[in-house]
Image: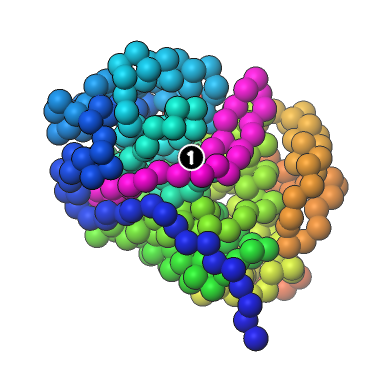
């Protein structure tokens, strides 16, 4: 007999093409009259368009969002929000902008709207990750929940192919860990499977044709589902590893998820057969970890942590931090296993495969290879 607990979402979601035109109405429905727009320095054009659309209901733009939500940036943003007497926050962008929006909301109680432009999924979670010094902490807080999310496929058309691939694999990682989460429920399992199907279908198309609107819609749909999974059930080893690597070494978020995922899947595979069978249904392969490795690598994504700026001598420190705080994982974690996994991921080796497993799939390979990660070098 099935027994489960499902926690429903409290976020309104509007999904489609051209939907950003409806943001002023959504803000109005929430009673927002003085909206502060936040974005990264690279997305001021999209933020400016939203300010124009909001007209008198927009009171300022804070365009200094950066990855991993450093508290010193948040403090400046909160001071700015107070100085313009903002009564709400609209985050335009990926997880960096949305993370800053959450950090402001948690400190001020302001309601938030989000217009996501990547596949990271933060908009659908009550999780606030922040960095202070070189340590990252995450908390689940009701105040971090975004009230209204407007997905506009058109805004994702400018997201470069290489970034889209790694961001999409970041979403796949949420779905994979949701499939074997300790508190997984039937709805999360269905959403995670559907997310994987959509992303496996759409990312190879986007890698070739970033302006393919159908594939963009499919990927954003998968990202919404994967983000919802992340917000609904607990994550495990994969997210812990990426969180430590991002917070401690400043590694780029989506790229780190992309490199690490096949290695964690290889590790967790024996302990999560039902989850792995669902991943395999989305991405048929002789071995599920090699399948993921071949998928991402074939689309030009990075495969080595060292190429993302991780120092080799950091492996030991990372392994220590990853095992230090106890957390649940389908397979018990020890320092030796984590060190082994990190060493392979650092060097760009294929994940460990069980005896008899085939070679990684290569049918996704894009020729000529697309360039990734250059802006993070
Ligand atoms: P990001 O928000 O840093 O965006 C990456 C880059 O792409 C930025 O330079 C951005 O300006 C640019 N960009 C984004 N959308 C674009 C578009 N449509 N067109 C052109 N350029 C675009 O990256 P991300 O991977 O979305 O977010 C990473 C951050 O989100 C990390 O800090 C991570 O910890 C956080 N995150 C948090 C959660 C959560 O639930 N709390 C979930 C996922 C990610």
Q: Which residue is drawn at 64% across and 31% down?
A: 136
From the top left corner, tell me how far across and down residue 30 is, in percent: 28, 42
**SS at mark 1?**
helix
From the top left corner, tell me how far across and down residue 184 is, in percent: 60, 66
Q: Which residue is drawn at 81% across and 40% down?
A: 324
From the top left corner, tell me how far across and down residue 368 is, in percent: 38, 47
Task: Look at the image and tell me in which quarter the N terminus lies.
Answer: bottom right
Question: In which of the image's four quarters is ligand 1 placed?
Answer: top left
The scheme the figure's colours follow is rainbow
Q: Residue at x 48, y 48 (%)?
A: 125
Front-lying residue, 26 or 94: 26
Q: Which residue is drawn at 26% across and 35% down?
A: 32
Q: For residue 204, say whether it is visible.
A: no
Q: For residue 342, say whether it is visible.
A: yes
Above or below, 187 against 331 in this view is below
Q: Is residue 326 left or right of residue 225?
A: right
Q: Cβ of disc 1 within 8 Å of ligand 1?
A: no
Q: How many labels does the image show?
A: 1
From the top left corner, tell me how far across and down residue 7 is, in percent: 53, 62
Q: In this view, does 203 lie to the left or right of 340?
A: left
* Quarter occupied by residue 322: top right
150 within the magenta span:
yes
197 within the magenta span:
no
Report the magenta residues as a range: 128-155
Residue projecting furthest to the bottom: 1
Q: Name the residue under label 1.
A: 143
């Amino acid at each position: 007999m099935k027994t489960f607990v499902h926690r429903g979402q409290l976020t309104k979601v509007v999904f489609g093409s051209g939907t950003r035109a409806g943001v002023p109405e959504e803000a109005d429905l929430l009673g927002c009259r003085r909206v502060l727009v936040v974005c990264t320095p690279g997305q001021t054009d999209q933020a400016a368009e939203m300010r124009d659309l909001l007209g008198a209901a927009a009171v300022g733009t804070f365009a200094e969002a950066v990855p991993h939500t450093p508290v010193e940036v948040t403090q400046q943003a909160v001071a700015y929000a107070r100085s313009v007497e903002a009564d709400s926050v609209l985050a335009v962008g990926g997880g960096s902008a949305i993370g800053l929006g959450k950090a402001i909301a948690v400190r001020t109680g302001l309601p938030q709207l989000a217009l996501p432009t990547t596949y990271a999924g933060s908009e659908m979670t009550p999780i606030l990750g922040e960095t202070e010094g070189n340590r990252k902490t995450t908390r689940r807080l009701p105040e971090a929940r975004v009230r209204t999310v407007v997905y506009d496929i058109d805004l994702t058309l400018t997201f470069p192919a290489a970034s889209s691939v790694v961001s999409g694999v970041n979403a796949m990682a949420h779905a994979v860990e949701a499939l074997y989460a300790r508190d997984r429920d039937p709805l999360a399992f269905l959403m995670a499977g559907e997310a994987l199907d959509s992303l496996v279908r759409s990312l190879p198309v986007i890698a070739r044709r970033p302006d393919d609107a159908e594939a963009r819609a499919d990927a954003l749909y998968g990202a919404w589902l994967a983000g919802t999974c992340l917000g609904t059930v607990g994550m495990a080893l994969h997210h812990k590893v990426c969180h430590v690597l991002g917070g401690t070494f400043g590694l780029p978020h989506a790229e780190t998820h992309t490199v690490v995922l096949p290695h964690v899947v290889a590790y967790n595979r024996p302990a999560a057969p039902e989850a792995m069978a669902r991943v395999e249904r989305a991405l048929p392969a002789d071995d599920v970890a090699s399948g993921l490795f071949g998928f991402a690598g074939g689309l030009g994504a990075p495969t080595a942590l060292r190429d993302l700026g991780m120092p080799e001598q950091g492996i030991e420190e990372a392994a220590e931090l990853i095992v230090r705080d106890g957390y649940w994982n389908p397979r018990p974690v020890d320092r030796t296993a984590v060190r082994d996994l990190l060493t392979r991921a650092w060097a760009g080796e294929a994940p460990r495969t069980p005896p008899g497993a085939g070679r990684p799939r290569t049918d996704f390979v894009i020729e000529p290879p697309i360039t990734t990660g250059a802006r993070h070098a």
